[in-house]
């Protein structure tokens, strides 16, 4: 087998180990949440007997270690469990499966993240490369100052400024990003325009600056001077001689920001009332809906691990030393 | 060797400045240079003389932080300095080409060799890409690269340094330039590899009647390559003459001093009192064995030079002696007793008696410590000296290395290369060792500075009876300092003996190759050597 494939498989297995460790951390930190789950779910009115019966039914009376391994076993089989909510003290059970609750929310989050990434990543690369190309020029400074400004402002502030400008003063886009499953693509895109722009402004600076720094770092290499002395133009030097050697750091920072688009956007979701997974998780934490919280946390962890794995693989396949060993 | 015809390059009154410490310093002060078609000019001088700057200036190029302040660079009738950058760029890689010092660093790691070879020719559309590729393969062949059909498909890290240097020559040749700047192209290579590269470069420059500027600090190398030699010092020309004249009767005193360095030679003497002895040592890094049962004896008060090309295990042997790399097999005997293999098992007395000096004095000293602190450390650690006694000893040590007390407060960054190495020697001396291991201690220094360091080491040996295990790849240094020589090849000792025995025939096969590859100050040396080897 090609050594690169071996490395990738190794990283994948390591990723699974990491995920396992993270699942333990998630489980134990949720156990630390204050209050009784039964009471929190059923409400103050529930009698002690009802609560006890409820705890028994959910297996909450079992020791934590047993519950943890039961949970891991079920998740490994693809069963994320049943939500605590939808039950009441009267014994009614209208609870839904966790997967059923998360799926549409996750889809929405991925849609917003995907659209934002489609705008933000190429934009950041373009700005980073051109800033490196014309470094220390007015253009470079302007790009740096603008992106730094947008990253320095809190997301909700950027969001409200955008609503004010693009929705209230000039009504270009709707200020509420409510979407539902039956909506056509064009309408959906229109609805999520403002959150997508907000997120783009937030993540572009980081990626753009890393791209610029990675390229400029390489420009001091002897092979760049050699390329100049072979008659390469500035743009050729950046695109053909520096960029191919800069993919690894760029991929790392892009992966980091894409992960943020999935796991860190709850503020933006709240501002625009967007039905994403972040809101679902926050709601579930306050209602002590443990299975949903655990499932969300696990999905977030998996996203981080997977994106970082992809960044690592890009780092490997763009490094000829690893791809073509002696 | 074409002497007539109009000049292809004419540099008039070149002045270049460099920016550092917030002001502009002169680097080149009014140098003139003329080159005819097909002529090869050697540029020599010590580091900092401005050789590379002048070489790049011949392309109308100044490194960032440098600028032309005066002068003309007239290439084929056009002043490059008044051209726009985009117009100059059209000449680079096509009519003027550059061959850099470290091929390993000058090739882009991300592209295949052949892509880089034909890059300039393709950009200028000198011929179709298919023709360029075919031409590159022909060039690889005429530069005697192995498997010319396929070597271009490899990436830079997949071929050796000597091969890379030849591929770079092919890259320069691909557009059939009128002028090539060779900037120390063989400095990073072993002597055995250097011969092949020199021969290939000379052949191809002859074949296409290309004019060349050959920059080097190695006189014997430039003697093989150049029709004329120009000597530079502090950014000014010292003298210029035809190669043979320059070698036999240099006019200026500075040039003569450059030449004389090579004549230093210590008379050898033998001794049977062995202070340090490596017996059947095996050692390696991880699972990679490097040393295979080597035996080396170091007589007391003598110098044993360990020679061999890079990767032969010279430095690994030194690491075994110091205890940094415990051997897997065999013993190191010191003053008749076995030394513990691991550093932590050795007594302070054993540690004190074996000291080491490194190639890069820069990295062997803490940049934040003053000279006083650096030399004091072994005095306190091994001899418990404090206060006045320590101060007295410090001054003694400084006078031994021919420096005065004004150096005590300086930081390493405030010293020249030679001074730094002297401080490292003083630090080793402070411990009062029996044996000093010198790992390529003069390789990073200019020849005149080298001579000073070698003389110092010899004097210290005379005065204190110190034994040196002297690792080097430079045969001139070996002649200068050694009593005995150990030749190493691929982790084995090929032979050990007195200098006179090892350096005179008959030799084992590898020693013969190594010795015959050392360039001599004779312009016909390479020609004769190639004839001898039947190339």
Image: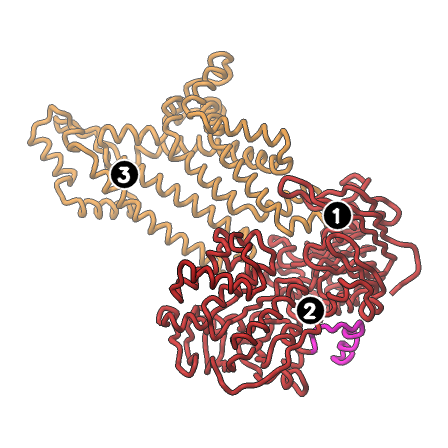
Chain colours: A orange, B red
Q: Mark 2 points at which residue?
A: B194
Q: In which quarter of the image is residue B489?
A: bottom right
Highlighted range, magenta: B516-535
Residue A312 at x, y percent in the picture: 46, 49
Q: Are marks 3 and 2 on the same chain?
A: no
Cα separation, mark 3 vs mark 2, equals 65 Å
Q: In which quarter of the image is residue B137?
A: bottom right
- The image shows residue B163, relative to residue A160, as above or below, that is below
Residue located 63% across and 64% down the image? B161
| Mark carried by residue B379 | none
Q: What element carries label 3?
A: helix
Q: Mark 1 points at which residue?
A: B123
Q: Name the residue under label 3.
A: A294
Residue A192 at x, y percent in the picture: 45, 24
Closer to us: B437 or B397: B397
Residue located 76% across and 43% down the image? B68
Q: Which chain carries label 3?
A: A
């Amino acid at each position: 087998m090609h050594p690169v494939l071996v490395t990738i498989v190794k990283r994948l297995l390591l990723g699974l180990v990491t995920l396992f460790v993270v699942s333990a951390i998630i489980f134990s930190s949720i156990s630390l949440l204050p209050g009784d789950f039964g009471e929190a779910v059923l409400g103050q009115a529930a009698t002690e007997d009802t609560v006890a019966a409820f705890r028994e039914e959910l297996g909450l009376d079992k020791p934590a270690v047993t519950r943890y391994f039961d949970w891991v076993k079920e998740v490994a089989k693809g069963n994320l469990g049943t939500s605590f909510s939808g039950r009441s003290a009267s014994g009614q059970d209208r609870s839904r499966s966790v997967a059923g609750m998360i799926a549409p929310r996750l889809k929405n989050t991925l849609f917003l993240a995907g659209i934002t990434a489609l705008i933000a990543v190429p934009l950041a690369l373009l700005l980073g490369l051109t800033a490196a190309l014309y470094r220390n020029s007015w253009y470079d400074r302007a790009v740096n100052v603008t992106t730094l400004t947008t990253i320095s402002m809190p997301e909700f502030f950027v969001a409200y400024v955008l609503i004010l400008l693009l929705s209230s003063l000039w009504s270009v886009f709707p200020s509420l990003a409510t979407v539902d499953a039956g909506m056509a693509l064009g309408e959906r895109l229109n609805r999520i325009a403002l959150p997508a722009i907000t997120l783009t402004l937030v993540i572009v600076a980081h990626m753009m600056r890393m791209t610029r720094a990675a390229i400029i770092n390489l420009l001091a290499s002897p092979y760049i001077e050699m390329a100049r002395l072979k008659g390469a133009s500035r743009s050729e030097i950046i695109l053909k001689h520096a960029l191919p050697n800069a993919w690894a750091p760029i991929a790392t920072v892009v992966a980091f920001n894409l992960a943020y688009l999935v796991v860190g956007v709850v503020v933006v979701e709240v501002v625009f009332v967007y039905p994403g997974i972040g809101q679902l998780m926050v709601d579930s934490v306050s209602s002590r809906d443990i299975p949903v919280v655990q499932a969300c946390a696990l999905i977030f962890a998996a996203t981080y691990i997977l994106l970082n794995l992809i960044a690592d693989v890009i780092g490997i396949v763009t490094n000829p030393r690893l791809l073509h060993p002696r | 060797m074409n002497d007539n015809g109009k000049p292809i390059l004419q540099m008039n009154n070149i002045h270049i400045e460099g920016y550092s410490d917030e002001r502009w310093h002169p680097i080149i002060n009014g140098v003139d240079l003329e080159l005819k078609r097909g002529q090869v000019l050697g540029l020599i001088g010590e580091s900092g003389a401005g050789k590379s700057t002048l070489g790049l200036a011949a392309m109308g190029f100044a490194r960032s932080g440098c600028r032309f302040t005066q002068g003309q660079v007239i290439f084929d009738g056009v002043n490059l300095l008044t051209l726009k950058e985009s117009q100059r760029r059209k000449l680079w890689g096509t009519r003027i080409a550059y061959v850099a010092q470290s091929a390993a660093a000058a090739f882009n790691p991300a592209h295949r060799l052949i892509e880089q070879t034909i890059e300039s020719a393709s950009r200028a559309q000198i011929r179709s890409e298919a023709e360029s590729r075919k031409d590159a393969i022909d060039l690889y062949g005429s530069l005697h690269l192995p498997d010319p059909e396929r070597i271009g498909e490899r990436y830079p890290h997949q071929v050796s340094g000597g091969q890379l240097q030849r591929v770079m020559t092919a890259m320069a040749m691909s557009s059939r330039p009128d002028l090539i700047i060779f900037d120390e192209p063989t400095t990073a290579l072993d002597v055995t590899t250097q011969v092949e590269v020199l021969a290939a470069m000379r052949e191809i420059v002859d074949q296409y009647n290309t004019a060349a500027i050959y920059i080097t600090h190695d006189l014997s190398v430039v003697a093989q390559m150049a029709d004329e030699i120009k000597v530079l010092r502090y950014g000014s020309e010292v003298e210029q003459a035809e190669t043979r004249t320059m070698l036999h009767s240099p006019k200026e005193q500075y040039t003569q001093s450059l030449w004389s360095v090579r004549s230093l030679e210590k008379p050898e003497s033998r001794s049977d009192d062995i202070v340090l002895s490596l017996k059947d040592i095996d050692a390696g890094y991880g699972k990679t064995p490097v040393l295979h049962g080597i035996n080396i004896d170091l007589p007391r008060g003598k110098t044993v030079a360990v020679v061999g090309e890079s990767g032969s295990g010279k430095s690994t042997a030194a690491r075994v002696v110091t205890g940094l790399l415990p051997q897997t097999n065999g013993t190191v005997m010191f003053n008749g007793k076995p030394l513990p293999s691991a550093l932590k098992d050795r007594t302070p007395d054993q540690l004190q008696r074996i000291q080491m000096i490194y190639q890069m004095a820069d990295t062997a000293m803490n940049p934040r410590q003053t000279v006083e602190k650096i030399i004091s450390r072994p005095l306190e650690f091994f001899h418990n000296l404090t206060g006045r006694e320590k101060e007295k000893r410090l001054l003694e040590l400084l006078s031994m290395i021919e420096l005065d007390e004004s150096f005590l407060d300086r930081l390493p960054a405030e010293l020249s290369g030679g001074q730094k190495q002297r401080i490292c020697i003083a630090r080793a001396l402070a411990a009062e060792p029996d044996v000093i291991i010198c790992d390529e201690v003069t390789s990073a220094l200019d020849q005149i500075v080298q001579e000073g360091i070698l003389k110092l080491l010899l004097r210290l040996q005379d005065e204190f009876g110190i034994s040196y295990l002297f690792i080097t790849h430079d045969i001139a240094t070996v002649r200068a300092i050694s009593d005995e020589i150990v030749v190493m090849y691929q982790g084995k000792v090929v032979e050990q003996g007195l200098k006179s025995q090892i350096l005179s025939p008959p030799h084992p096969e590898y020693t013969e190759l190594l010795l015959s590859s050392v360039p001599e100050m004779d312009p016909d040396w390479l020609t004769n050597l190639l004839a001898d080897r039947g190339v």
